[in-house]
Amino acid sequence: MALRTASSSAPTLPGTAWSGPLTVAPADVASTLYQSFEQHRPYFNEFINLGGRPAEQQLTFAEWRAPTRLYSLLASYGDHIYRNHPGVQREHKPLKSLWAQWFIGLLIPPLMMALLTQRRGLDISLSGIATGFHETGRAASFWIAAKEDPQLTLLGPRERLGTLWITTVKPVIDTLDASGDINGKLIWSNTGYLVGWFLGELKPLLGDALVSELRHSCFNEKSLLSGADNPLFRTMLVRDGLFVRRTCCQRYRLPDVQRCGDCTLK
Protein backbone atom coordinates (compact mmCIF):
# COMPACT_ATOMS: atom_id res chain seq x y z
CA MET A 1 0.00 0.00 0.00
CA ALA A 2 1.47 3.36 -1.03
CA LEU A 3 1.44 6.01 1.66
CA ARG A 4 1.65 9.73 1.07
CA THR A 5 4.66 11.49 2.57
CA ALA A 6 4.44 14.30 5.07
CA SER A 7 4.33 17.90 3.92
CA SER A 8 7.31 20.01 5.01
CA SER A 9 5.39 23.30 4.80
CA ALA A 10 2.59 22.78 7.29
CA PRO A 11 1.32 26.04 8.82
CA THR A 12 1.78 26.79 12.50
CA LEU A 13 -0.99 25.68 14.84
CA PRO A 14 -2.94 28.54 16.43
CA GLY A 15 -1.98 29.82 19.84
CA THR A 16 1.46 28.24 20.15
CA ALA A 17 5.00 28.29 18.89
CA TRP A 18 5.28 24.89 17.24
CA SER A 19 8.51 23.55 15.80
CA GLY A 20 9.40 20.27 14.19
CA PRO A 21 8.22 18.43 11.07
CA LEU A 22 4.44 18.48 11.33
CA THR A 23 2.42 16.19 9.15
CA VAL A 24 -0.57 17.13 7.03
CA ALA A 25 -2.48 13.91 7.51
CA PRO A 26 -4.45 12.33 4.68
CA ALA A 27 -7.95 11.02 5.25
CA ASP A 28 -6.57 7.68 6.41
CA VAL A 29 -5.27 8.62 9.86
CA ALA A 30 -4.22 5.04 10.58
CA SER A 31 -1.94 4.85 7.52
CA THR A 32 -0.31 8.14 8.41
CA LEU A 33 0.44 7.03 11.96
CA TYR A 34 1.70 3.63 10.87
CA GLN A 35 4.12 5.38 8.52
CA SER A 36 5.24 7.84 11.19
CA PHE A 37 5.80 5.09 13.74
CA GLU A 38 7.65 2.95 11.22
CA GLN A 39 10.00 5.83 10.41
CA HIS A 40 10.68 7.05 13.94
CA ARG A 41 9.64 4.33 16.42
CA PRO A 42 9.08 1.06 14.50
CA TYR A 43 8.62 -0.95 17.69
CA PHE A 44 5.35 0.93 18.31
CA ASN A 45 3.84 -0.99 15.41
CA GLU A 46 4.64 -4.25 17.20
CA PHE A 47 2.06 -3.62 19.92
CA ILE A 48 -0.18 -0.84 18.55
CA ASN A 49 -2.97 -1.74 16.09
CA LEU A 50 -4.55 1.26 14.36
CA GLY A 51 -7.99 1.36 12.76
CA GLY A 52 -10.30 -1.45 11.84
CA ARG A 53 -11.66 -3.44 14.75
CA PRO A 54 -10.01 -4.59 17.98
CA ALA A 55 -8.95 -8.20 18.28
CA GLU A 56 -11.47 -10.47 19.97
CA GLN A 57 -9.35 -10.83 23.11
CA GLN A 58 -8.74 -7.09 23.52
CA LEU A 59 -10.83 -5.39 26.19
CA THR A 60 -12.29 -1.91 26.26
CA PHE A 61 -11.69 0.29 29.29
CA ALA A 62 -15.27 -0.32 30.43
CA GLU A 63 -14.63 -4.08 30.30
CA TRP A 64 -11.27 -4.35 32.04
CA ARG A 65 -12.06 -1.76 34.72
CA ALA A 66 -14.96 -3.89 36.04
CA PRO A 67 -13.92 -4.94 39.58
CA THR A 68 -14.02 -8.67 38.93
CA ARG A 69 -12.01 -8.41 35.71
CA LEU A 70 -9.46 -5.98 37.18
CA TYR A 71 -9.05 -8.16 40.27
CA SER A 72 -8.43 -11.19 38.03
CA LEU A 73 -5.80 -9.33 35.97
CA LEU A 74 -4.00 -8.07 39.06
CA ALA A 75 -4.17 -11.51 40.69
CA SER A 76 -2.60 -13.07 37.59
CA TYR A 77 0.13 -10.46 37.64
CA GLY A 78 0.77 -11.15 41.32
CA ASP A 79 0.99 -14.87 40.57
CA HIS A 80 3.63 -14.09 37.96
CA ILE A 81 5.71 -11.73 40.10
CA TYR A 82 5.66 -14.05 43.14
CA ARG A 83 5.90 -17.30 41.16
CA ASN A 84 9.31 -18.15 42.66
CA HIS A 85 8.34 -17.00 46.16
CA PRO A 86 5.06 -18.75 47.03
CA GLY A 87 5.49 -18.28 50.76
CA VAL A 88 6.13 -14.53 50.65
CA GLN A 89 3.28 -12.20 51.53
CA ARG A 90 2.31 -10.11 48.53
CA GLU A 91 2.71 -6.34 48.58
CA HIS A 92 -0.13 -4.95 46.52
CA LYS A 93 1.04 -1.34 46.33
CA PRO A 94 4.22 -2.02 44.33
CA LEU A 95 2.35 -4.68 42.34
CA LYS A 96 -0.22 -2.14 41.17
CA SER A 97 2.50 0.45 40.61
CA LEU A 98 4.38 -1.86 38.25
CA TRP A 99 1.17 -3.04 36.57
CA ALA A 100 0.29 0.60 35.87
CA GLN A 101 3.80 1.25 34.54
CA TRP A 102 3.28 -1.47 31.95
CA PHE A 103 -0.11 -0.07 30.92
CA ILE A 104 0.77 3.63 30.80
CA GLY A 105 4.33 3.03 29.64
CA LEU A 106 3.17 1.20 26.52
CA LEU A 107 0.17 3.38 25.64
CA ILE A 108 1.18 6.97 26.36
CA PRO A 109 4.39 7.40 24.28
CA PRO A 110 2.64 6.49 20.99
CA LEU A 111 -0.24 8.82 21.84
CA MET A 112 2.18 11.62 22.75
CA MET A 113 4.03 11.16 19.47
CA ALA A 114 0.77 11.19 17.51
CA LEU A 115 -0.49 14.33 19.24
CA LEU A 116 2.78 16.26 19.01
CA THR A 117 3.88 15.42 15.46
CA GLN A 118 0.64 15.10 13.48
CA ARG A 119 -1.43 17.99 12.13
CA ARG A 120 -4.72 16.24 12.79
CA GLY A 121 -5.64 15.62 16.40
CA LEU A 122 -6.01 11.93 17.18
CA ASP A 123 -9.16 10.87 19.01
CA ILE A 124 -7.73 9.66 22.33
CA SER A 125 -10.99 8.91 24.12
CA LEU A 126 -10.91 5.62 26.00
CA SER A 127 -14.00 4.46 24.11
CA GLY A 128 -11.74 4.19 21.05
CA ILE A 129 -8.96 2.22 22.77
CA ALA A 130 -8.89 -1.48 23.65
CA THR A 131 -6.19 -3.39 25.54
CA GLY A 132 -4.77 -6.83 24.96
CA PHE A 133 -3.44 -8.39 28.15
CA HIS A 134 -0.53 -10.79 28.46
CA GLU A 135 -1.10 -14.16 30.06
CA THR A 136 0.61 -12.74 33.15
CA GLY A 137 -2.13 -10.12 33.51
CA ARG A 138 -0.28 -6.97 32.42
CA ALA A 139 -0.98 -4.88 29.32
CA ALA A 140 0.72 -6.13 26.16
CA SER A 141 -1.00 -4.52 23.15
CA PHE A 142 -3.46 -1.80 22.24
CA TRP A 143 -6.01 -1.15 19.53
CA ILE A 144 -6.71 2.50 18.71
CA ALA A 145 -9.62 3.52 16.49
CA ALA A 146 -7.36 6.09 14.74
CA LYS A 147 -9.98 8.72 14.02
CA GLU A 148 -9.56 12.47 13.93
CA ASP A 149 -10.84 14.58 16.80
CA PRO A 150 -11.66 17.91 15.10
CA GLN A 151 -11.50 19.77 18.42
CA LEU A 152 -8.01 18.46 19.16
CA THR A 153 -6.91 19.43 15.66
CA LEU A 154 -7.48 23.07 16.60
CA LEU A 155 -5.38 22.85 19.77
CA GLY A 156 -1.68 23.51 20.30
CA PRO A 157 0.77 21.03 21.84
CA ARG A 158 0.29 22.07 25.49
CA GLU A 159 -3.47 21.80 25.21
CA ARG A 160 -3.22 18.47 23.43
CA LEU A 161 -1.07 17.00 26.20
CA GLY A 162 -3.41 18.42 28.84
CA THR A 163 -6.29 16.66 27.10
CA LEU A 164 -4.30 13.43 27.09
CA TRP A 165 -3.74 13.59 30.85
CA ILE A 166 -7.38 14.33 31.67
CA THR A 167 -9.19 12.32 28.99
CA THR A 168 -7.04 9.20 28.72
CA VAL A 169 -4.71 8.84 31.69
CA LYS A 170 -6.78 10.16 34.59
CA PRO A 171 -9.64 7.62 34.30
CA VAL A 172 -7.12 4.76 34.33
CA ILE A 173 -5.31 6.10 37.40
CA ASP A 174 -8.58 6.92 39.16
CA THR A 175 -9.71 3.32 38.61
CA LEU A 176 -6.56 1.91 40.18
CA ASP A 177 -6.75 4.41 43.03
CA ALA A 178 -10.34 3.39 43.74
CA SER A 179 -9.38 -0.30 43.78
CA GLY A 180 -7.38 0.22 46.98
CA ASP A 181 -3.80 -0.47 48.13
CA ILE A 182 -2.28 2.41 46.13
CA ASN A 183 -2.59 6.17 45.99
CA GLY A 184 -3.09 7.64 42.54
CA LYS A 185 -0.39 10.22 43.28
CA LEU A 186 2.25 7.48 43.08
CA ILE A 187 1.05 6.45 39.62
CA TRP A 188 1.05 10.09 38.49
CA SER A 189 4.62 10.37 39.75
CA ASN A 190 5.59 7.34 37.66
CA THR A 191 3.76 8.88 34.69
CA GLY A 192 5.66 12.15 35.09
CA TYR A 193 8.94 10.28 34.86
CA LEU A 194 7.74 8.56 31.67
CA VAL A 195 6.57 11.83 30.14
CA GLY A 196 9.84 13.61 30.94
CA TRP A 197 11.85 10.79 29.38
CA PHE A 198 9.76 10.57 26.20
CA LEU A 199 9.75 14.31 25.64
CA GLY A 200 13.53 13.99 25.51
CA GLU A 201 13.17 11.21 22.95
CA LEU A 202 11.06 13.54 20.78
CA LYS A 203 13.66 16.32 20.63
CA PRO A 204 14.82 15.38 17.11
CA LEU A 205 11.22 15.82 15.89
CA LEU A 206 10.08 18.77 18.02
CA GLY A 207 13.25 20.74 18.68
CA ASP A 208 14.82 21.82 21.96
CA ALA A 209 12.67 24.92 22.43
CA LEU A 210 9.31 23.16 22.27
CA VAL A 211 10.49 20.26 24.44
CA SER A 212 11.71 22.72 27.07
CA GLU A 213 8.39 24.55 26.94
CA LEU A 214 6.42 21.33 27.33
CA ARG A 215 8.58 20.06 30.19
CA HIS A 216 8.12 23.36 32.02
CA SER A 217 4.36 23.32 31.54
CA CYS A 218 4.07 19.65 32.51
CA PHE A 219 6.05 19.88 35.74
CA ASN A 220 6.11 23.54 36.85
CA GLU A 221 2.58 24.76 36.11
CA LYS A 222 -0.12 24.07 38.73
CA SER A 223 -2.92 24.32 36.17
CA LEU A 224 -3.45 23.19 32.61
CA LEU A 225 -4.38 25.73 29.96
CA SER A 226 -7.96 24.44 30.28
CA GLY A 227 -7.99 25.59 33.91
CA ALA A 228 -8.02 22.07 35.32
CA ASP A 229 -5.48 21.03 37.95
CA ASN A 230 -2.27 19.72 36.39
CA PRO A 231 -1.82 16.14 37.68
CA LEU A 232 1.87 16.14 36.66
CA PHE A 233 2.75 19.25 38.66
CA ARG A 234 6.03 18.66 40.56
CA THR A 235 6.11 14.97 39.72
CA MET A 236 9.55 15.86 38.33
CA LEU A 237 11.88 18.34 40.03
CA VAL A 238 14.89 20.27 38.79
CA ARG A 239 18.16 19.30 40.49
CA ASP A 240 21.53 20.41 39.18
CA GLY A 241 19.81 21.74 36.08
CA LEU A 242 18.08 18.44 35.23
CA PHE A 243 14.55 17.17 35.76
CA VAL A 244 14.64 14.18 38.12
CA ARG A 245 11.93 11.96 39.55
CA ARG A 246 10.50 12.99 42.87
CA THR A 247 9.15 9.72 44.26
CA CYS A 248 10.28 6.09 44.27
CA CYS A 249 7.97 3.82 42.28
CA GLN A 250 8.24 1.07 44.94
CA ARG A 251 9.16 -1.69 42.50
CA TYR A 252 12.24 -2.56 44.59
CA ARG A 253 9.88 -4.16 47.11
CA LEU A 254 8.90 -6.89 44.64
CA PRO A 255 10.91 -10.12 44.40
CA ASP A 256 13.21 -10.54 41.40
CA VAL A 257 12.33 -7.06 40.07
CA GLN A 258 15.35 -4.90 39.32
CA ARG A 259 15.64 -1.55 41.09
CA CYS A 260 15.51 1.49 38.79
CA GLY A 261 18.92 2.80 37.82
CA ASP A 262 18.08 6.27 39.14
CA CYS A 263 16.01 5.20 42.14
CA THR A 264 15.39 8.11 44.51
CA LEU A 265 16.32 5.88 47.48
CA LYS A 266 19.94 5.55 46.38
Image (cartoon, grey):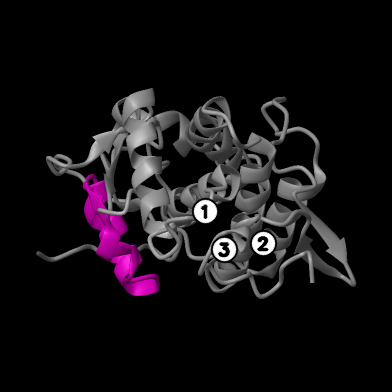
- Which of 131/216 is in front? 131
Q: Which residue is mark 3?
A: 198
Q: Amino acid at mark 3?
A: Phe
The residue positioned farthest toward the left in the image shown: 1
The secondary element bearing badge 1 is classed as: helix
User: Looking at the rendered structure, which numbered label has been put on residue 211?
Assistant: 2
CB atoms of marks 1 and 3 within 8 Å:
no
The image position of residue 41, as x and y in percent, is 38, 70
Horizontal arrangement in the rendering, residue 20 relative to residue 266 (left or right) = left
The verdict on residue 51 being magenta is: no
- Viewer-nearest of labels 2 and 3? 3
The image position of residue 142, as x and y in percent, is 29, 48
Residue occupying the point 78% across, 55% down: 246
- Which of 186/195 is in front? 186
The secondary element bearing badge 2 is classed as: helix
Q: Which residue is mark 1?
A: 98
State which quarter of the image contains the N terminus. Answer: bottom left
